[in-house]
Image (tube, rainbow, N blue to C red):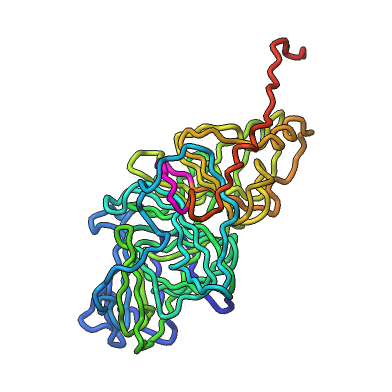
Amino acid sequence: MAGLKYMSGFGNEFASEDPRCPGSLPEGQNNPQVCPYGLYAEQLSGSAFTCPRSTNKRSWLYRILPSVRHKPFTPMSCGDLTENWNDVEPDPNQLRWKPFNIPKSSEIKVDFISGLHTVCGAGDSKSRNGITIHMYTCNTSMTDKCFQNADGDFLIVPQQGEILITTEFGKMMVEPNEICVIQQGMRFSVDVFGETRGYILEVFGAHFELPDLGPIGANGLANPRDFQTPVAWYEDRTVATGYTVVNKYQGKLFSCQQDFSPFNVVAWHGNYTPYKYNLENFMVINCVAFDHADPSIFTVLTAKSTRPGVAIADFVIFPPRWGVADHTFRPPYYHRNCMSEFMGLIKGHYEAKEEGFQPGGASLHSIMTPHGPDVDCFEKNSTAILKPERVAEGTMAFMFESSFSMAVTKWGLDTCHHLDKSYYECWEALQNHFNPNWKPSSK
């Protein structure tokens, strides 16, 4: 949307005030006896008070009315949103989904909240340790309604249709090939402009951060300056018919009513904010000699566990890049992994499976489930003339990788009716090329 402004940086100490109210940020303190313009001061904490400075997350919001002024929350239907991992039996097979349906607006109006469908997950929001993966498919903007996730952070990956996200901190327009993160407890509303679809990675108990670069050095991968945080924007709007706040709490949905818009924050400062990132800005690291590097070199964001080097979840992309490795099978290798790998496709054709894996679809290769290139990819790349070539041009695939052994929901296995039960067949034609008489070539 033209005119939206952002501040640059990742995890910065930001400060912003709506230009309609100059001087609305208090000077020299967080909680004055009387705030400028008669505003209320409210702190939003994303970490325990006593966390080290490097991990301490909080922001101060200066708002027309505090968020505490609302009627009691009452339970509401959760639809296909769930945290019940025992509803169906475990399935260790390779799983692939055809593109998930987007409801037609001429048939039914579906907004972002009612269009949430849980595909898989593990762990528990009550114990603050886990992961959930959702799809959103919708066609209607949220009207006089906002969403708050008390359980964890949402990393949102639009696949079809841009989304305008209004938050307490300001507005963000997020298009396909961009991502955004709405952190725990932040209220937001989603406007759409037609049939809209995307993926959501939800994590409990940790926030996303940039991966350590180690010997890569000071620069590379997702650079902090390319992340964008919205500037303050407010509306002083009374809603006589009632404004609905939907709260996701302990895996269930609750709603309450209030008579004013929650997007009434005139000014704010802090380091706990929503943000967005354009995947085209990712500085790709790749092999320039031989072999296929591990996909961890494509990590955009990570939510760390308490075990060093092991993530609750990594967000990894497979962007356009050069392939130049000599005497190497260049596509991804055959693999069994101690991590779970959920993949989605924003656009284009994924190099290891150019057919079958489609934009708006997904795949899940669970812990220790074998996976890798299909037969066409293997045969083609085993005999290809190796020369520098562009890989994944016009394509953006991604992976949510997790140390959790994820369970698939009933909706994912059955109700959605998009599970590709013939997926395993893409490997059935792999041939036995073993030659016991093979000899090394003389040099």
Residue 346 at x, y percent in the picture:
60, 56
> Which residue is drawn at the image coordinates 46% and 71% (left, top)?
230
> Which residue is drawn at the image coordinates 40% and 65% (left, top)?
273
Farthest residue to the right: give it.
385
Q: Is residue 160 left or right of residue 186?
A: right
Q: Is residue 232 left or right of residue 384?
A: left
Is residue 344 in view? no
Q: Residue 404 in magenta?
A: yes
How many marks are shown on the rendered structure?
Answer: 0
Q: Is residue 57 left or right of residue 181?
A: left
Q: Residue 22 in magenta?
A: no
Q: Is residue 262 above or below residue 330?
A: below
Write the start and end of the magenta stretch as one range.
Answer: 401-411
Q: Which quadrant of the view contains residue 428?
A: top right
Image quadrant containing the N terminus: bottom right
Residue 268 at x, y percent in the picture:
36, 74
Farthest residue to the left: give it.
33
Q: Is residue 79 above or below residue 397?
A: below
- Give 178 or 220, whichever is nearer the viewer: 178
> Which residue is drawn at the image coordinates 40% and 59% (left, top)?
81
Q: Is residue 144 left or right of residue 443?
A: left
> Which residue is drawn at the image coordinates 59% and 67% (left, top)?
161
Q: Which quadrant of the view contains residue 278?
A: bottom right
Residue 5 at x, y percent in the picture:
52, 74
Image quadrant containing the C terminus: top right
- Give 424 or 170, whichever is nearer the viewer: 424
Is residue 71 in view? yes
Residue 42 at x, y percent in the picture:
27, 74
